[in-house]
Image (cartoon, helix red, strand yellow):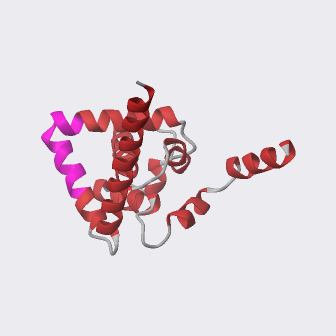
């Protein structure tokens, strides 16, 4: 039994990024689409968003793409990190937190994120997926609340 669990874990750890797109499916928003549109919007090559560079010209678009991936897909932080050069989930958390803060404080960033969200959601089938994701997030929150109430 232990051997089977180790094999399953190894398969999950060693999947390549293209397999994640297949899981997302054609009706859902993929990180590949998000990266493509964010790169086009900022006038940079898509490969530069997954590179190691911390130059602001690539860093901010990368963080915006991570933020949008978290908001528009049902993927976990580690899954998103794999699509951005194998980055750690804490890097994705930082990006999401930073862009959330900037959207609230900076009208220029808010406009960028709004424009990109609109572009991505205008893709066929995207609006339905956004609603499904919001409902799934609400379900998770309700489950957490129920657990807290049960423990009291």
* Residue 132 appears left or right of 23: left
Region rendered in magenta: 102-116
Q: Residue at x 36, y 38 (%)?
A: 96
> Where is residue 142, by image quadrant?
top left
x and y percent of residue 107 in the render? 13, 41
Q: Residue at x 52, y 44 (%)?
A: 81
Camera-nearest residue between 116 and 147: 147
Where is 13 relative to 96, above or below?
below
Where is 144 relative to 4, above or below?
above
Q: Is residue 54 visible?
A: no
Q: Residue at x 38, y 31 (%)?
A: 149
> Where is residue 41, by image quadrant?
bottom left
Which secondary structure is most common in the magenta stretch?
helix
Where is 94 relative to 86, above or below?
above
Q: Is residue 36 visible?
A: yes
Q: Residue at x 41, y 45 (%)?
A: 140
Where is 88 relative to 116, above or below?
above
């Amino acid at each position: 039994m232990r051997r089977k669990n180790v094999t399953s874990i190894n398969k999950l750890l060693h999947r390549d990024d293209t397999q994640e797109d297949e899981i997302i499916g054609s009706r859902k928003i993929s990180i590949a689409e998000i990266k493509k549109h964010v790169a086009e919007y900022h006038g940079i090559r898509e490969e530069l968003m997954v590179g190691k560079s911390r130059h602001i010209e690539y860093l901010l678009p990368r963080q915006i793409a991570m933020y949008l991936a978290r908001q528009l897909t049902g993927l976990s932080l580690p899954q998103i990190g794999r699509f951005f050069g194998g980055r750690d989930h804490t890097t994705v958390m930082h990006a999401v937190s930073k862009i959330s803060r900037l959207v609230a404080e900076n009208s220029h960033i808010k406009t960028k994120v709004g424009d990109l969200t609109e572009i991505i959601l205008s893709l066929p089938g995207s609006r339905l997926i956004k609603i499904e994701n919001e409902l799934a997030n609400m379900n998770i929150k309700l489950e957490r609340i129920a657990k807290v109430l049960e423990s009291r």
